[in-house]
Amino acid sequence: MKHLVVLGGGTGGTVIANRMCARLGADWRVTVIDRDDQHIYQPGLLLLPFGVNHERELVRSRRRTLDRAVRLELGEVRALDRATRTVHLADGRSVGWDVLVVATGCQPAPGETAGLTDGGWGVTTHEFYTLAGSMRLRDALRGFRGGRVVVNFVDLPIKCPVAPLEMAFLLEAMATERGVRAATEIVYATPLEGAFSKPIASRVLGDVMAARGISVVPDFSVSEVDGAGGAIRAFDGRSVPFDLLVTVPVNSPDPLVAAAGLGDAGGWMRVDRHTLQSLVDPTIFGIGDTTDVPTSKAGAAAHYQAEALATVLEHYLADQPLPPAYDGHATCFVETGHGRAMLLDFDYAHEPATGRYPLPGVGPFTLLEESAANHWGKLAFKWMYWNGLLPGGELPMESRYSSLGKWS
Ligand SMILES: Cc1cc2nc3c(=O)[nH]c(=O)nc-3n(C[C@H](O)[C@H](O)[C@H](O)COP(=O)(O)OP(=O)(O)OC[C@H]3O[C@@H](n4cnc5c(N)ncnc54)[C@H](O)[C@@H]3O)c2cc1C
């Protein structure tokens, strides 16, 4: 019996395991290994602090998200032995692979920034990239009556790079709805030159921020957080004071990638950007946030990659040349508050453009333009995630980018 082993039962790992389970013959076994049995719908962590999502809607047992034929092993993966093709777990168990897919994502690492987890952490200083952090922020916002709110992220890459922007927009909308907008100042401090990393989207999103009265502090590279004193400091000596800080800490890949010799200088897994095959070991493939592919770290990208990787693996197992199946496609809803959202769609070669999506000229979603339809699309995505995408169903949109009906 041959063995496909998937490390990580999050978005990318679950979809590829379910898809391959349906495609592989009876001589293959599929195993997913994850450290816990809690699959979290991470986009909901942005909305939970505002009462839009409740934690019970965001967490499911991994067992429930995986095809019955997929074996689930719960345990911390400690090391990979590439010479013997063996995964070692912290509790002493080991699992051998014929093909390995690494889908271990990335995690916030607040301890990497000086002062961030000292005085004020969880009181005046918050993160929303974990369920616990998102719930603490919800509690803190319950009594919000105004003040100086700073939203920032420490450094790129982070998963869902639009999430801090969305947080700023949602805080602005919340202050308006509560009638305390005049008593609230919202500041977006970013290490980038503008609102976003992609120039066209950055301009458009910067305009929306200006229209909402959110001030942007660009090129702000955080050196230190003083939670008790209420200030973030940059390496260039500037300081931004706050009453409430909502930050996205540094995001780190799991250290096992680097320890196995699969990573780049930052520990991200080096893969061919079109086939997702490891650049150092042909029996290993990567998917999702843990890889170094130059596109957004997003669930949508992981879904598109799963479709591409399923095709690549079929060729690999048939000893055929690997097709360049993944084009960098990513699609991101950007909540802008007040019941509206924007949608960005891009790949390695194309910047986000305007137009309609997914049906060119029809929509119902509007690209690079705010609309209520986009907002409802973002909310509806949770249902689609649990019921359509995770089980490995066909995507309701093309996994490859299309320029049809789009213009810059
Ligand atoms: C606040 C927030 C909002 C977001 N919003 C959006 C959005 O609107 N749209 C969008 O497309 N994306 C969004 N994302 C990003 C999206 O959730 C991720 O990009 C996606 O989950 C990546 O999938 P993945 O499989 O690479 O990693 P994950 O889904 O994070 O899964 C990684 C898995 O690996 C396991 N693991 C890691 N190391 C080990 C180990 N050593 N041993 C055992 N198990 C291990 C973890 O337990 C985890 O289950 C958001 C993320 C956040 C935090």
Image (cartoon, rainbow, N blue to C red):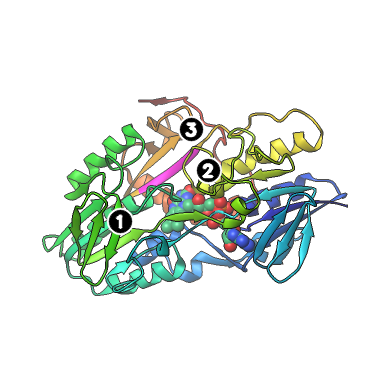
Q: Main secondary structure of the magenta part?
A: strand
Mark 1 vs mark 3: in front? 1
Magenta highlight range: 330-334
Task: Say which residue label 1 marks.
Answer: 223
Mark 1 vs mark 2: in front? 1
Density class for disc 2 (Cα within 10 Å; few <14, some 14-19, many ≥20) is many
Left or right of 231: which side holds 221?
A: right
Question: What amino acid type should be assigned to the residue bearing mark 2?
Answer: Ala
Residue drawn at (72%, 62%) of the image: 88
Camera-side residue of 184 and 337: 184
Task: Say which residue label 3 marks.
Answer: 347
Task: Say which residue label 2 marks.
Answer: 301
Question: What amino acid type should be assigned to the residue bearing mark 1?
Answer: Ser
Quarter where residue 240 is shown:
bottom left
Residue drawn at (64%, 40%) of the image: 307
Question: What amino acid type should be assigned to the residue bearing mark 3?
Answer: Asp
The quadrant of the picture occupied by the C terminus is top left
Quarter where residue 406 is shown:
top left
State the separation of the CA atoms marked 1 and 2. 31 Å
Quarter where residue 228 is shown:
bottom left
Density class for disc 1 (Cα within 10 Å; few <14, some 14-19, many ≥20) is some
